[in-house]
Amino acid sequence: MKRPLLWRNRTSPPGLRQKSVPVRRIGGDLYLCNIKPKVEESLRLSGMLEYLGIDHLFHPKKEAIRTIVSRLNPSNCETCSTLSFTECAGTPAAAARFD
């Protein structure tokens, strides 16, 4: 699993924008979860929250995972062998593996 990004110069609002470009280019996206109020305010003031999309900010981790898994391209799940989250158990790929 990916390590969480820490709020440092490299992950400041301009840094996040820079990181999002190649991720979005290959069809991925960035989501933020459990960020501190001051960080959220900084993102809002910088325009980064609008750039990412307010729907990319989550406070409860379970809500984030549930929502993000539902947004994944199902074809990505077909080749995934980790089934990292409980939500993955409901995917067609998981069902096919256990048949």
Image (cartoon, rainbow, N blue to C red):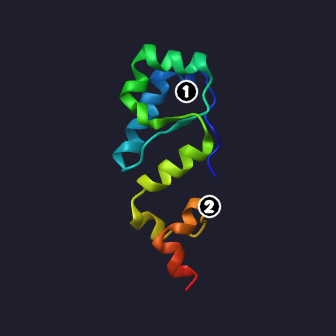
Q: Is residue 84 at all visible to an observer of this figure? A: no
At 51% across and 15% down in the image, what residue appears? 42
- Point out residue 65 in the picture as x, y percentages from the top left corner: 55, 49
- Point out residue 3 in the picture as x, y percentages from the top left corner: 65, 43
SS of the residue under disc 2? helix
Give the left or right position of residue 78, taking residue 60 as reference.
Answer: left
At 40% across and 32% down in the image, what residue appears? 52
- The one of 18 and 41 positioned closer to us in this rendering: 41
Please name the residue that numbered disc 2 is placed on: 86
Above or below, 14 relative to 61: above
Above or below, 21 relative to 46: below
- Point out residue 94 in the picture as x, y percentages from the top left corner: 54, 73
- The one of 74 and 14 positioned closer to us in this rendering: 74
Which kind of residue does numbered mark 1 sit on? Thr
Q: CA distance from mark 2 to mark 1?
A: 29 Å
Above or below, 75 relative to 5: below
Q: Is residue 40 at all visible to an observer of this figure? A: yes
Mark 2 or mark 1, earlier in chain: 1
Give the left or right position of residue 49, taking residue 12 as reference.
Answer: left
At 52% across and 67% down in the image, what residue appears? 90
Local packing at callout 1 (Cα closer than 10 Å; few below 14, some 14-19, many 20+) is some
Please name the residue that numbered disc 1 is placed on: 11
Which quarter of the rendering shows the C terminus?
Answer: bottom right
Q: Nearer the viewer, mark 2 or mark 1?
A: 2
Which kind of residue does numbered mark 2 sit on? Thr
- Point out residue 75 in the picture as x, y percentages from the top left corner: 39, 67
Local packing at callout 2 (Cα closer than 10 Å; few below 14, some 14-19, many 20+) is few
Give the image quarter of residue 17. top left
